[in-house]
Amino acid sequence: MGFFLVFEGIEGCGKSTQIKLLGDYCRQKGLPCVVTREPGGTPIGEEVRKIFLHSRNVEITHLTELLLITAARAQHLHQVIRPALAENRIVLCDRFLGATLAYQGYAGDVPVALIQKTHEIFLDNINPDLTLLLDCPVEVGLSRSRARNIQEGKEKEEGRFEDKLTDFHCRVRDGYLNIAKKDPETVKVVDASQSVAKIHEEILGQFEKKMKEAGYGI
């Protein structure tokens, strides 16, 4: 059966921290889980990630981004996500279709209908069982993300989106919230301006509720 859970949100919302905490929780409970990310998750996907995020690639269009992420996602589904779900594992993924809709669609002006059609044709229209949208003010998220890149020495390698104007990131956030509004049963908004512990507690509540509904005894 498997269970597919995706973390979404703007830059610096805390996804990386929270997905690690949930992965640790699953392992402590003896729940078989796979933690992965997009772009990335496979050797091919990680190469796409380097192109996608490097600040030198400022001329990449939003349509090119869609094509790159679709190719990486097809490989990710084939090599990681589908096999794990087939083995009844829990897949925890940092970004998926919601990110494409928010970044390339709502913020990048690629028609949302085109993104959804691309997902249907090339990716079998697979969707998460649960999406956790970590939401915080754009200024807060960008400040965190830029500080992290500086601390880790990744301003160039992973700084292309942080270099974009604040208005772009506001459209991303609005896009995410619109996605959540349209699908409140599957997409749950979590206030990411809270403490790490409080966010984790809220995530566990959403996770355990959805897992029980899916037939997992936890």
Image (cartoon, grey):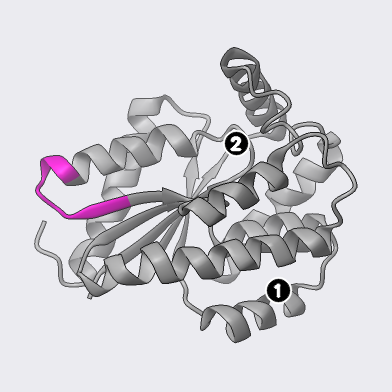
Q: Nearer the viewer, mark 2 or mark 1?
A: 1
11 up-or-down from 114: above or below: above
Residue bearing the label numbered 1: 115
The residue sitting at 81% across, 73% down in the picture is: 111
165 up-or-down from 126: above or below: above
183 up-or-down from 96: above or below: below
Q: Nearer the viewer, residue 162 or 215?
A: 162
Q: Position of residue 22 (x, y in %)?
A: 29, 42
Q: Residue furthest top?
A: 151
Tell me the SS state at disc 2. Answer: loop
Left or right of 161, for residue 131: left
Tell me the SS state at disc 1. Answer: helix
Q: Position of residue 161 (x, y in %)?
A: 75, 39
Determine the CA span between mark 2 and mark 1. 25 Å
Q: Quadrant of residue 210?
A: bottom left
Q: Position of residue 149 (x, y in %)?
A: 63, 22
Chain part drawn in magenta: 27-34
Left or right of 89, for residue 7: right
- What residue type is disc 1 on? Ile
Q: Residues within 10 Å of mark 1 (few under 14, many from 20)?
A: some
Q: Which mark is residue 136?
A: 2
- What residue type is disc 2 on? Cys
Left or right of 206, for residue 1: left
Q: Residues within 10 Å of mark 2 (few under 14, many from 20)?
A: many
The residue sitting at 65% across, 61% down in the picture is: 69
